[in-house]
Image: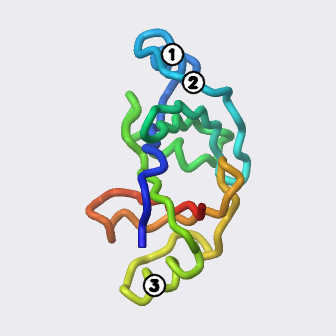
Amino acid sequence: MIGRLNHVAIAVPDLDAAAAQYENTLGADVGPAQDEPDHGVTVVFITLPNTKIELLYPLGEDSPINGFLAKNPAGGIHHMCYEVDDIIAARDTLRAEGARVLGTGEPKIGAHGKPVLFLHPKDFNGCLIELEEV
């Protein structure tokens, strides 16, 4: 069902510093910051030859990233995103297997302009999983 790894998301306490570190220290291709109000985050994508890194920073007081950074003040890996061909079929199969889909269960449009869903970390070895339709 899942395809390639689309990205690994890292929550960061300072978006500018983290982006600069990837660009200047590691020599990575760092994109511009973009606000994603539907998800409560500002993101920066770092393009690598085989995948991407997504830096996440809270957007507003109700951002889900605020709680994560309160528990992990230095930042840390927040989620992993896998590609799927059909997000509705993937959702339905996962629910039939007992996996919990977060939120309403209806896909939202993600930072790449494609439908995404999140799966409960307790169902996947403590890892928050994002699915993105490609």
Q: Position of residue 116 (x, y in %)?
A: 60, 62
Q: Position of residue 29 (x, y in %)?
A: 54, 23
**Viewport quadrant of the N terminus:** bottom left
Say which amino acid is labelled 1: Glu
Circle 2 SS class: strand
Q: Residue at x 37, y 36 (%)?
A: 76
Q: Residue at x 46, y 42 (%)?
A: 9
**Viewport quadrant of the C terminus:** bottom right
Say which amino acid is labelled 2: Val
Q: Position of residue 133 (x, y in %)?
A: 59, 64
> 50 or 24, which is in the foreground?
50
Q: Residue at x 45, y 41 (%)?
A: 51
Do labels 2 and 1 touch, CB within 8 Å?
Answer: yes
Vertical relation: 46 (above or below) 4: above
Query: How many marks on residues?
Result: 3
Q: Residue at x 57, y 73 (%)?
A: 87
Q: Which mark is residue 93?
A: 3
Q: Which mark is residue 30?
A: 2
> Dot 2: within a 10 Å radius of its alpha carbon, few (fewer than 14), some, or many (20 or more) residues?
many
Q: Indicate which disc, 2 or 1, sits on the residue closer to the N terminus.
A: 1
Q: CA distance from mark 2 to mark 1?
A: 6 Å
Instruction: Locate residue 89 relative to residue 121 in the image: left or right.
Output: right
Say which amino acid is labelled 3: Thr
Instruction: Locate residue 75 relative to residue 31 in the image: left or right.
Output: left
Q: Which mark is residue 23?
A: 1
Q: Indicate which disc, 2 or 3, sits on the residue closer to the N terminus.
A: 2
Instruction: Locate residue 99 relative to residue 59 in the image: left or right.
Output: left
